[in-house]
């Protein structure tokens, strides 16, 4: 079984709809992240959480919100989707090995907003 | 402003040759740098980490160098194989208390049989 899972894997929605992307991990990591990936722009950080009570904005948090329901679950919501939120979304968890962070990514969710 | 640059053009090489990918950065002083591999439609997978006080790191056919004076990392794949075809991302730590990684946009490698 995959260590980091994301649902759904693909989603097509319309402008103005509310969308939730879910992420679950079985690695026992405290830190979880949401990124979006656009062609030519690489991975950009949306939100991150270091534990259930800690939520932090990344560089592109506008238009998004998150919920850390448990250590293993971190959800990303688009309250009112817009076309420029069409992208590939990745959840990741971190294994802090000493003073470094190796990130483990989920398989991604391809979101299309029409 | 802080910037990470990877060659946006695909690198196209013949099987058996050495592939060399470049990661340049400006206005950072990272404590370490990581390389990830990403296949189409999948999440990145960690390959190697190199610290600021290390010049070179090896793992099987992979070699990474880190020159903090030039602000550059080179990623080499020796004896390349078609299965090495993928996009390779470099990532730097953001040296504050946030423990975040900043990713480059990646370079696509194509290895021809």
Image (cartoon, coloured by chain):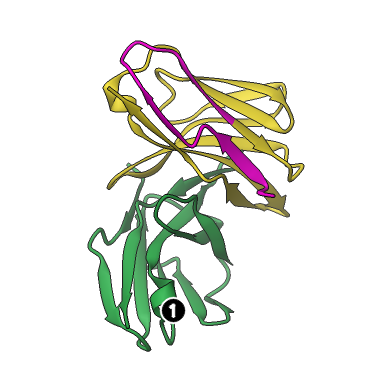
Chain colours: A yellow, B green
Q: Horizontal and vertical percent for residue A61? A: 44, 24
Location of residue A38 by image quarter: top left
Relative vertical location of residue B83 with respect to residue B87 in this rendering, above or below: below
- Which of these two is toward me, B66 or A101? A101
Location of residue A44 by image quarter: top left
Residue at image point 44% right, 84% down: B78
Residue at image point 57% right, 72% down: B54
Q: Horizontal and vertical percent for residue B80? A: 41, 82
Q: Horizontal and vertical percent for residue B55? A: 52, 75
- Please, what secondary structure does the residue beneath circle 1 have? strand
Q: Horizontal and vertical percent for residue A105? A: 56, 47
Relative vertical location of residue B44 with respect to residue B23 in this rendering, above or below: above
Local packing at callout 1 (Cα closer than 10 Å; few below 14, some 14-19, many 20+) is: some
Q: What segment is highlighted magenta in the picture?
A: A1-22
- Which of these two is toward me, A41 or A2? A2
Question: Looking at the image, which residue sits at the far left?
Answer: B9
> Left or right of B84: which side holds B61?
right
User: Which residue is tagged 1?
Assistant: B77
Residue at image point 55% right, 65% down: B47
Q: Magenta span has A58?
A: no
> Left or right of B33: which side holds B21?
left
């Amino acid at each position: 079984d995959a260590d980091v899972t994301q649902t759904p894997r693909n989603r097509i929605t319309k402008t103005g709809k509310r969308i939730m992307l879910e992420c679950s991990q079985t690695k026992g990591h405290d830190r979880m992240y949401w990124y979006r990936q656009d062609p030519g722009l690489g991975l950009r950080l949306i939100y991150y959480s270091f534990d259930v009570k800690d939520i932090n904005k990344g560089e592109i948090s506008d238009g998004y919100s998150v919920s850390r329901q448990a250590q293993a679950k971190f959800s990303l919501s688009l309250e009112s989707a817009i076309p420029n939120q069409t992208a590939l979304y990745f959840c990741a968890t971190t294994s802090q090995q000493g003073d470094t962070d190796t990130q483990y990514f989920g398989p991604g969710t391809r979101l299309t907003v029409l | 402003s802080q910037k990470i640059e990877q060659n946006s053009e695909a690198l196209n090489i013949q099987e058996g040759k050495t592939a060399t990918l470049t990661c340049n950065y400006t206005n950072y002083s990272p404590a370490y740098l990581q390389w990830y591999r990403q296949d189409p439609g999948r999440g990145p997978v960690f390959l190697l980490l190199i610290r600021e006080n290390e010049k070179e790191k090896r793992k099987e056919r992979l070699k990474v160098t880190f020159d903090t004076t030039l602000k550059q990392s080179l990623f080499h794949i020796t004896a390349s194989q078609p299965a090495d075809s993928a996009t390779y991302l470099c990532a730097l730590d953001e040296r504050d208390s946030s423990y975040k990684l900043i990713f480059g946009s990646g370079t696509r490698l194509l290895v021809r049989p």
